Amino acid sequence: MIRSVVRGVGAETPRRIMHNNDFVNLVDTSDEWITQRTGIRQRHIASDDETTASLGEAAARKALSAAGMTPDDIDLIVLATSTPNNTFPATAVEVQHRLGMDHGFAFDMQAVCSGFVYALTTADLHIRGGMAKRALVIGSETFSRILDWTDRTTCVLFGDGAGALVLEGIEGETGAGARGIIASSLRSDGVHRDKLYVDGGPSTTGTVGKLRMEGREVFKHAVAMITDVVEDVLGRAGVTADDLDWFVPHQANKRIIDASARKLGIADEKVVITVDRHGNTSAASVPLALDAAVGDGRIKKGDLVLLEAMGGGFTWGAVLLRW
Ligand code: UT7
């Protein structure tokens, strides 16, 4: 049986950091409100020369270096984003070109904050189906470009960045004890479309649009949706929350992460938190958090790692893997 194993991880954040106090001259808010309600202390904001493609390329190069590979070794790129450089072509194809690749194939995945979990699952299926041998899975976003900077209920929450993984298909054992992706669970339901959306697009307004969110409504659904897919992957893998070494959730709000971990019975010390440094970076948040926890030596080879995300659509999903 073929199993998709993680060979390397990398991340890139824009140079400019915006702290909570930097918002007080823009909108009616405070460091205290943002910190207490969200856990966010700062976020990175892209400058004009930093784009979803440039950040994605930089994260991909770091992941390749960590894997000891070059672009020649890769035959698939799946890039999760809701803030592509252009409506088309896919930002994944631009990253492919920037990496100097003229072989293989690349495409974008659009599932908003769940994008990375969707992309990882899609790349895993391509590898296990024999369509690709080694894949770059990238989450890259520049949400600062679609924020309404006069709306205090959204502009303080999001940030920019990118993270990437190299996945390789290997022949070997299956089951929860072996390395690689063990189980995935994906869900969506368009009934919640209006609770988190962008008010523009090519086929409607002909504009890019700005992000709109009923935060309290999203919050109300988040914990139930997250626990639903997490319980599904744990059940299908035949493991329990106690077996996990690390829980790497989507980083939208520390209160959502804490409530989900509590409901799932996952101990605080197993939860990776980066929302304080990055804010909500949508499809980039899970790989940015993975990069942080691998970089500081917490996540090690052989660890059982649970990823989850939830976002606009709504979409939600979880992936269980052995690092
Ligand atoms: O990644 C995709 C998924 N997205 C999410 O997971 C986001 C989910 N939602 C949330 O994280 C939270 O709902 C928020 C952080 C967005 C808001 O926290 P909340 O505890 O749900 O606050 P709220 O929306 O109920 O607002 C409480 C008060 C309101 O004032 P009133 O009506 O009580 O007078 C808001 O107008 O806080 C006010 N408020 C602010 N005050 C200062 C909203 N934004 C701000 C702000 N600064 N930036």
Image (spheres, grey):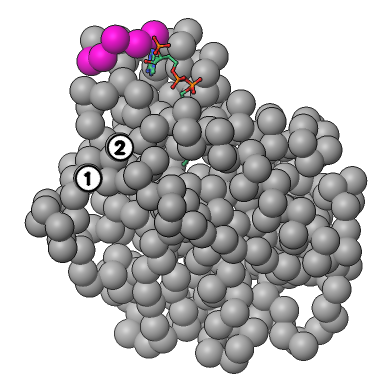
Q: Is residue 140 left or right of residue 48?
A: right
Q: What element carries label 1?
A: loop
Identify the residue shown where x is 64% and y is 47%: 226
| Rendered view: 307 above or below 132 | above
Image quadrant where residue 224 sits? top right
Is disc 1's CB within 8 Å of ligand 1?
no
Measured in 3D between alpha carbons, the distance from the residue under mark 2 to the one under mark 1, in whole angstroms, is 7 Å
Which amino acid type corresponds to the residue marked 1 in the rendered image?
Asp
User: Label 2 neighbourhood size at 10 Å, few (<14), some (14-19), many (20+)?
Assistant: some
Identify the residue shown where x is 34% and y is 29%: 154
Residue extending furthest bottom? 130
Q: In this view, does 317 lie to the left or right of 203?
A: right
Identify the residue shown where x is 85% and y is 81%: 173
- The reply to whether discs 2 and 1 touch (Cβ–Cβ < 8 Å) is yes
Location of mark 2 (residue): 212
Report x, y in % for residue 322.
77, 62
Is disc 2's CB within 8 Å of ligand 1?
no
Residue in front for this viewpoint, 250 or 48: 250
Identify the residue shown where x is 69% and y is 31%: 259
Image quadrant where residue 94 sits? bottom left
Quadrant occupied by the C terminus: bottom right
Q: Give the range drawn in magenta.
A: 26-30
| Rendered view: 201 above or below 12 | below
Magenta stretch prevailing secondary structure: loop
Q: Is residue 246 left or right of residue 241?
A: left
Location of mark 1 (residue): 199
